[in-house]
C-alpha cells in the first residue's frame, strides 16, 4: 500500500529562483549553520543530491519523497554517511518548503539506513604506552637522505616534520575528547593555558562551549606554540592554532586539514602497533576515563552530549565484563 505524502504549508511566496541549485546556494549562504568543517560537508552533501536530481528534473517542485528515496538507495556509502546526507537533506527541505509552495514534504516517509551497533573502542594501557613511545620516535624522524651527512653529525629533521604540533594534536584529542572537525577549526586565541580551557569551541551542530583539557594536553599545545608554530604562522599570516607546513601544503589559509589529521593518526597507529587507530578512539578513551572518575554527568559535560543515549553507550557491558565482576 503506497503512502500519501504529508502536505506542507508554504509560509511565503517564491522569489525569482528557478533551479534547486539556486535555492541550495541561498540556503547555504544565509541559513545553514555549523562550524566551517560542518558547512563544508553540508555543501558536499547537497551538491551530491542536486547533481543527481537535475539529471531527472529542472523543476524544484518535482522533488518528491520517491526521488529522495531513489537517490539514497543508489548511494554506495556507509550507513552513517547515508544517514548524514539524509539529515542534511531534511534540513534543506524543511527550509525550502517554507519559501516555495510544495504539496508534500520531499522527505516524508523516507527512512534512514540501519546502522550496525558497535561498542565504543577503548585503548589499553599498553596501546597508550606504544602510541606515546611512537610519538617520540616517528614524529621526530630524520631526513631519508641522512646518509649524505658525515658520520657523527646529526641529520636534520624531515622538512615535513612538525613533532611538537603532532604531539599536541594527539594529546589534545586524548585530553579533551574533541572531534577532529572542532580541533582543526580552533584559532590560537581560543587556547587559554592558565585556565586549561579551550574557549568558545564550535562543535557539531553549531554548539559553542568552553572545553576543559588535561594539564598534559595544555603543556603539549604550549610547547608547540612556543617552539614550532611561529615560522609557519609568519608565512601563512593565519590565526589557526594548528598550521600546515608552509613548505609543502596546498592550503590557502594555512589551517591544517581534517584529512591530514586522520592520515597522521592512522600512520601513528601503524608505527605504534595499534592497527586501525582512529581519532575518534581518543574521544572514546576520554569518555571511559571520565566514566570511572566522575560518572555519566562528567562524560556528558566533557563531550558535550545533547542526547543521553550517546552517553549511555559507554555503560554497555559485555558478558566477559560481567563475569569479571561476578568472580
Image (tube, rainbow, N blue to C red):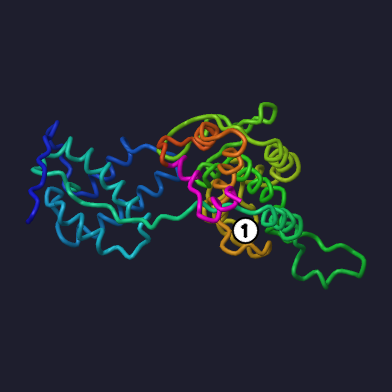
Comparing 26 with 7, the one in front is 7
Circle 1 is placed at which residue position?
248
Q: Quadrant of residue 197?
A: top right
Secondary structure mostly seen in magenta is: helix
Seen in the image, is 291 located left or right of residue 81? right
Instruction: Please give the name of the residue rendered at 41% of the width and 48% of the height, measured from the top-left corner.
Output: 40
Q: Is residue 201 above or below residue 167?
A: above
Comparing 116 with 48, the one in front is 116
What secondary structure is marked by label 1?
A: loop
Number of numbered discs present?
A: 1
Q: Residues within 10 Å of mark 1 (few under 14, many from 20)?
A: few
Seen in the image, is 206 located left or right of residue 14? right
Comparing 324 with 24, the one in front is 324
Q: Is residue 300 above or below residue 148?
A: above
The magenta stretch spans which residues?
Answer: 310-327
Could you tell me which quadrant the N terminus lies in? bottom left
Locate residue 24, reporting x and y percent: 26, 45
Instruction: Please give the name of the residue rendered at 68% of the width and 61% of the height, measured from the top-left corner.
Output: 272
Q: Quadrant of residue 237?
A: top right
Instruction: Please give the name of the residue rendered at 55% of the width and 34% of the height, measured from the top-left corner.
Output: 295
Instruction: Please give the name of the residue rendered at 11% of the width and 35% of the height, measured from the top-left corner.
Output: 9
Locate residue 153, reporting x and y percent: 90, 64
Whether residue 287 appears in magenta in the rendering, the answer is no
Whether residue 315 appears in magenta in the rendering, the answer is yes
Amino acid at each position: 500500500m503506497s503512502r500519501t505524502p504529508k502536505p506542507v504549508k508554504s509560509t511565503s511566496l517564491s522569489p525569482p529562483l528557478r533551479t534547486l541549485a539556486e535555492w541550495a546556494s541561498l540556503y547555504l549562504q544565509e541559513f545553514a549553520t555549523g562550524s566551517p568543517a560542518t558547512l563544508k560537508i553540508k555543501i558536499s552533501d547537497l551538491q551530491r543530491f542536486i547533481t543527481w536530481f537535475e539529471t531527472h528534473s529542472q523543476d524544484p517542485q518535482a522533488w518528491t519523497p520517491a526521488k529522495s528515496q531513489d537517490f539514497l538507495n543508489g548511494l554506495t556509502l556507509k550507513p552513517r554517511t547515508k544517514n548524514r546526507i539524509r539529515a542534511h537533506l531534511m534540513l534543506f527541505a524543511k527550509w525550502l518548503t517554507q519559501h516555495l509552495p510544495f504539496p508534500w514534504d520531499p522527505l516524508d516517509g523516507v527512512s534512514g539506513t540501519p546502522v550496525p551497533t558497535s561498542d565504543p573502542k577503548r585503548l589499553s594501557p599498553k596501546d597508550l604506552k606504544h602510541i606515546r613511545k611512537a610519538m617520540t620516535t616517528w614524529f621526530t624522524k630524520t631526513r631519508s637522505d641522512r646518509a649524505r651527512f658525515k658520520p657523527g653529525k646529526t641529520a636534520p629533521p624531515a622538512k615535513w616534520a612538525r613533532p611538537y604540533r603532532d604531539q599536541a594534536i594527539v594529546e589534545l584529542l586524548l585530553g579533551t575528547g574533541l572531534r577532529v572537525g572542532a580541533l582543526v577549526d580552533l584559532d590560537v586565541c581560543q587556547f587559554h593555558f592558565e585556565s586549561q580551557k579551550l574557549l568558545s569551541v564550535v562543535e557539531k551542530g553549531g554548539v559553542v562551549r568552553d572545553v576543559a583539557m588535561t594539564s598534559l594536553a595544555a603543556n603539549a599545545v604550549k610547547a608547540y606554540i612556543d617552539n614550532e608554530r611561529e615560522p609557519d604562522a609568519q608565512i601563512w599570516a593565519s590565526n589557526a592554532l594548528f598550521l600546515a607546513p608552509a613548505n609543502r601544503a596546498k592550503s590557502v589559509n594555512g589551517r591544517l586539514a581534517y584529512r591530514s589529521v586522520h592520515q597522521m593518526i592512522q600512520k601513528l597507529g601503524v608505527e605504534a602497533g595499534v592497527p586501525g587507530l582512529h581519532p575518534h578512539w581518543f574521544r572514546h578513551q576520554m569518555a571511559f576515563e571520565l566514566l570511572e572518575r566522575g560518572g555519566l554527568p562528567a562524560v556528558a559535560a566533557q563531550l558535550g552530549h545533547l542526547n543521553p543515549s550517546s552517553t549511555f553507550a559507554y555503560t554497555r557491558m559485555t558478558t566477559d565484563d560481567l563475569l569479571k565482576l561476578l568472580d
